Amino acid sequence: MFSKNEYLVTEGQRCRHIYFLEQGALRGFYNLDGKEITHWFAFEKDFVTSFHSFSTQQPAVENIQLLEGSILWAISKDRLTGLLNQYHDIERLLRIAYEKYYIRLEDRYVNAQFKTATERYQTLLLQTPHIIERVPLGYIASYLGISQETLSRIRSRI
Amino acid sequence: MFSKNEYLVTEGQRCRHIYFLEQGALRGFYNLDGKEITHWFAFEKDFVTSFHSFSTQQPAVENIQLLEGSILWAISKDRLTGLLNQYHDIERLLRIAYEKYYIRLEDRYVNAQFKTATERYQTLLLQTPHIIERVPLGYIASYLGISQETLSRIRSRI
DNA sequence: TAGGATTTTTGACATTCATCAAAAAATAAA
DNA sequence: TTTATTTTTTGATGAATGTCAAAAATCCTA
């Protein structure tokens, strides 16, 4: 149980857990040229972690912050490793989970690089309409890779 | 052994193999609004496949084309599945390979969405300088998400 | 519910980049 | 080598988006 605006992971710190988000909302962001860039959101039933840091156990380059009071379950890297050694099936589940996450990221990548700002916003509306009600526009703008002003203008135009 | 400009995978066709590229160069691209968008390149010692199609066995949305005559090794989905069932260790290797590929894609994603065209080109020069000599500029431009003219101007400016 | 803080919108202007067209350069073929 | 083809560069112009500043709207909280 964590409360709004708390941090799950902070830049520079090693991320030792994968979390399951039962209830609430999170964002992952990092600092680029003095600006906070939100690069993902997570909602109910998502698994979250600072993937790079968790996987390599290097210091995280990103921050994970609570957007709402949330209920989270955590499993540590060590405990997960134990489970993987003990149960072949978990290794397989994880491999398949990675496949799915990879495909999703590929999709986002294409979307990010080759669609216009307006198209990206419309895709977001279609795929996850609830984001709009739960997340400040500024965060959404940086998630879409545009300025808040531009997002505001896109919204007024639609 | 395949020769220049041949296709390994074509849009609409199911991709049933993962390939190991021993020698040569490939690109993955798809058609968007009548334009070919190159979204990755592969060179010696890379594993390649149309990931989404291979994983889900849905028809591919992308094409894989030879940029040079190349030597490739293939393993079919069925044979790989057999190996995964037989050897726990291969499941683990695959899971770890996916981790690495995921992290790499995450990196590219950030790069694509939040860096300027010039920065993206400079990163490319730094990370894979040999691309420039082996791949036409037009492909590189679309890989970077800019027009060929803009890339040409960036090059003259540096 | 009134005042303060935060978030969103609007305006003016500068910059980046795409597009279309054509010239120049490089590469391949005869 | 000469010609044809492909690739790269250059020029002119317009559209999309960023930035800075301020106004308007919304939301907290006392």
Image (cartoon, coloured by chain):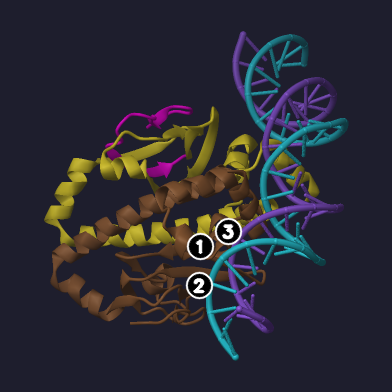
Chain colours: A yellow, B brown, C cyan, D purple
For marks 3 and 2 on the same chain, the one whose residue lies earlier in the sequence = 2
Question: How many angstroms separate mark 3 from mark 2 (CA)?
Answer: 18 Å
Q: Residues within 10 Å of mark 1 (few under 14, many from 20)?
A: many
Tag shown at residue B141: 3
SS assignment at label 3: helix
Q: Secondary structure at mark 2?
A: loop
Instruction: Give the spatial CA distance, label 2 vs label 1.
Output: 9 Å
Which residue is identified by label 1?
B39
Quadrant assignment, res B41: bottom left
Q: Which residues are magenta?
A: A1-24
Residue under numbered circle 2: B62
Nearer the observer, B44 or A129: B44
Residue at (25% x, 56% y) in the render: B96
Q: Is residue B141 magenta?
A: no
Calculate the distance from the C-alpha at mark 3 to the C-alpha at mark 1.
10 Å
Relative vertical location of residue A57 with respect to residue B34 in this rendering, above or below: above
Q: Residue D25: horizontal and vertical position, in percent?
A: 78, 31
- Taking B79 as reference, is B105 left or right? right
| Mark closest to the chain's N terminus, 2 or 1 | 1
Q: Amino acid at mark 3?
A: Ala
Quick one: label 3 or label 1, which is nearer the N terminus? 1
State left or right for residue D15 relative to residue B122: right
Picture quadrant where residue A53 is located: top left
- Check disc 1 and report its element: helix, strand or loop: strand
